Amino acid sequence: MPIDACRDYSLTGPNAKASGFGSAEWYASPAPRKRIKELMKRSDRLALTNYGTWLGLVVATGVLLVAVWGTAWAWPVALVYGVFYGSGADSRWHETGHGTPFKTRWLNDAFYHLASFMSLRNPHLWRWSHTRHHSETVIVGRDPEIAFPRPPSIGNWVLNLLYIPAITKELGKMVRIAFGNLTEAEKSFLPESEWPKTFAASRAHLLVLALVGLAAVTLQSWLPLFLIGLPTFYGSWLHHILATTQHAGLAEDVPDHRMNSRTFYLNPFFRFIYSNMNYHIEHHMYPMVPFYNLPALHEEIKADCPPAYASLLACYREMVPAVMRQQADPNHYIRRPLPAGAGATPTYERPVIAAE
Amino acid sequence: MPNWVRACGANDVEAEDLVRFDHGDRTFAVYRSPDDEYFCTEGLCTHEQVHLADGLVMDYEIECPKHNATFDYRTGEAKRAPACVNLATYPVKIENGSVWIEI
Ligand code: FES
């Protein structure tokens, strides 16, 4: 049976032990060490400018929401507040999880915990899940963050664009973990030494949400929940529409981020919300480069990468037909063209365990 | 019996940086601190065996290029997840403009 016909994405299934290649074998576009060192440098000034602006916008639109609550203006203001809160936090959870924006570690950590709560993600579980995602990006049975397993369910795909199933799952996960329960899949990437912290974080998140719920009941108003908790549900959609482009429809089981990740050009406002993750090949290839240096890294290595998509729309124009086709043909995927002279994709031979 | 091996020239490592040094089937990382002291650790991250030489030295810490774990390269102590195991460290001396490590 060809390996492509054996897609078992479970982290405890037949593919779970079959990856067979180490982190060191991933392709990296060549760049002078001196230049990469410059790009890896952290700046509290640049990070604080971005994070301070973001937090300022969350607070300002939150205050505005309180001011217009009870009027027709509350809906559009909530929409804007929700995007800053939910979508803005999601990309910042990710970036501070890598520890890259700030030079000062406690600032990274403080924003990491804040953004983890705002995106309702367990900070410890997700740190380790994301570590695995970077070790084995889109490797079937190894990567816990494959958002669109093949064959894709179109219903789920559309709902996921609005982040609805995923965020509901996160809430359920929070309750389960608060009660000290981890799934076998979670245990496969989360070391036992991290379990107590993981349980404590979910309990703390749940406690804050319960207090907000209590405030809502006491005040007989939805406002507290619209300010804290619900924005993750009604405001994360923009992040998710952008993040869907990261790997959807591209190759699986290949140790080359140029083949399984997407880089595209995006307007400055969306890049602010999304922390420049539209440079996704660059982020995966050099995860130590902070978000504010990704455009420069893109310039440095673009001659060795597939051409960047011109826009978000261009990504969807390619992704949607590919995902539709994958329903009938799960082996189909988008093959990205490399420019002349680019380094070749490493040959990857997955052990045959999955095909037995 | 101490076994001192020449790893590199003292000027082969920039201040606040590191270089990789391979010896037989072993690999090491040689560091020069911001105040021009030299240190040596094993060359592979204890998390997933990635070469630390592609990482970033900030003050007295080395950050792994793969998942951003950090270690104090003076003591080898793992400071940030996902590294949970410390790095082995090796004595270093400077003689005649060269960095020597005891392995
Ligand atoms: S390999 Fe070094 S942090 Fe994972």
Image (cartoon, rainbow, N blue to C red):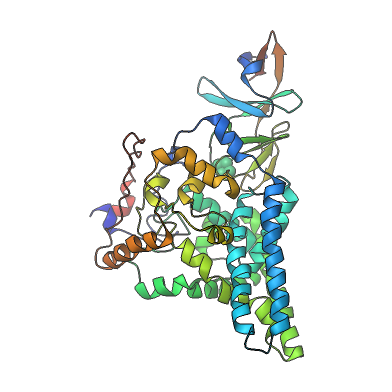
Query: Residue at the location (60% across, 64% down)?
Result: A88
Task: Name the residue nearer the viewer: A125 or A273.
Answer: A273
Dividing the image into 4 quarters, which one contains the N terminus of chain A?
bottom left
| On screen, residue A226 above or below A58 | below
Q: Position of residue A74 (x, y in %)?
A: 64, 84
Q: Quadrant of ligand 1?
A: top right
| On screen, residue A53 above or below A307 | below
Task: Name the residue nearer the viewer: A202 or B18.
Answer: B18
| On screen, residue A81 above or below B100 | below
Q: Position of residue A161 (x, y in %)?
A: 45, 70
| On screen, residue A3 above or below A78 | above
Farthest residue, direction top: B96
The answer to whether residue A286 is seen in the rendering is: no
Query: Residue at the location (60% across, 83% down)?
Result: A75
Farthest residue, direction bottom: A220
Q: Position of residue A350 (x, y in %)?
A: 34, 46
Quarter of the view holding residue A41: top right
Query: Residue at the location (71% across, 71% down)?
Result: A60
Quarter of the view holding residue A73: bottom right
